[in-house]
């Protein structure tokens, strides 16, 4: 019985010490950066079939901490993002390029989610537009 009680006391002491250590790390929050986009939406309007479906979202690091864009995810495989892999220093700018597949005819609304070390992360971006039918196929179907 004495061994069991001794083990319980030792286990309790270990738990208290480990909880105290985790409390210390919580009080030292890591400094976060801040990302500000010039615009979070892009409207292609009417866009030609098989045309260049690339647009850019320009942003600035408005904090004193280097901004790191970890990953950019899109709502479907028809949209491909490119983003800077190197840290963006305070006051510097960067851009996220998004390319939509303009071989898909019709209206679209897609979202892009930017994950980074900013206090306002994740940031949602969106693209909209309407890919016009292929004029070659449209004229041959009328005959």
Image (cartoon, grey):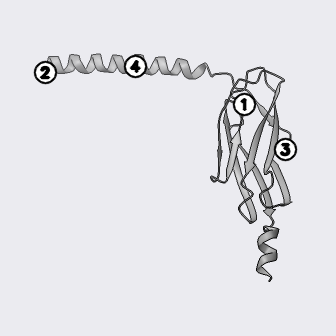
Provide the residue designation for mark 1.
84
Question: Considering only order in the chain, which callout, 2 or 4, is on the residue closer to the N terminus?
Answer: 2
Question: Considering only order in the chain, which callout, 3 or 2, is on the residue closer to the N terminus?
Answer: 2
Residue beneath the point at 40% across and 19% down: 16
Cα separation between marks 2 and 3 = 69 Å
Residue beneath the point at 72% across and 36% down: 120
Helix, strand or loop status at disc 1: loop
Q: Quadrant of residue 56?
A: top right
Provide the residue designation for mark 3.
39
Provide the residue designation for mark 2.
1
Q: Could you tell whether 100 is left or right of 11 in the image?
A: right
Q: Could you tell whether 126 is left or right of 29 in the image?
A: right
Front residue of 105/10: it is 105
Residue beneath the point at 74% across and 61% down: 108
Q: State whether residue 2 is above or below residue 131.
A: above
Q: Are marks 1 and 3 in contact (CB under 8 Å)?
A: no
x and y percent of residue 59 in the render?
81, 35
Cα separation between marks 1 and 2 = 62 Å
Helix, strand or loop status at disc 4: helix
In this rendering, the label closer to the viewer, 1 or 3? 1
Q: Are marks 3 and 4 in contact (CB under 8 Å)?
A: no
Cα separation between marks 3 and 4 = 49 Å
Helix, strand or loop status at disc 3: loop
């Amino acid at each position: 019985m004495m061994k069991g009680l001794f083990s319980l006391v030792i286990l309790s002491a270990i738990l208290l010490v480990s909880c105290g250590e985790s409390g210390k790390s919580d009080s030292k929050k890591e400094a976060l950066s801040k990302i500000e986009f010039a615009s979070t939406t892009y409207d292609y309007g009417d866009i030609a079939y098989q045309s260049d479906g690339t647009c850019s979202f320009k942003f600035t690091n408005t904090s004193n901490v280097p901004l790191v864009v970890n990953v950019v995810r899109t709502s479907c495989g028809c949209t491909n993002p490119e983003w800077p892999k190197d840290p963006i220093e305070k006051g510097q700018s960067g851009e996220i390029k998004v390319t939509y597949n303009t071989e898909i005819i019709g209206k679209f609304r897609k979202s892009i989610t930017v994950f980074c070390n900013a206090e306002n992360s994740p940031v949602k971006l969106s693209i909209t537009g309407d890919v016009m039918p292929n004029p070659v196929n449209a004229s041959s179907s009328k005959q």
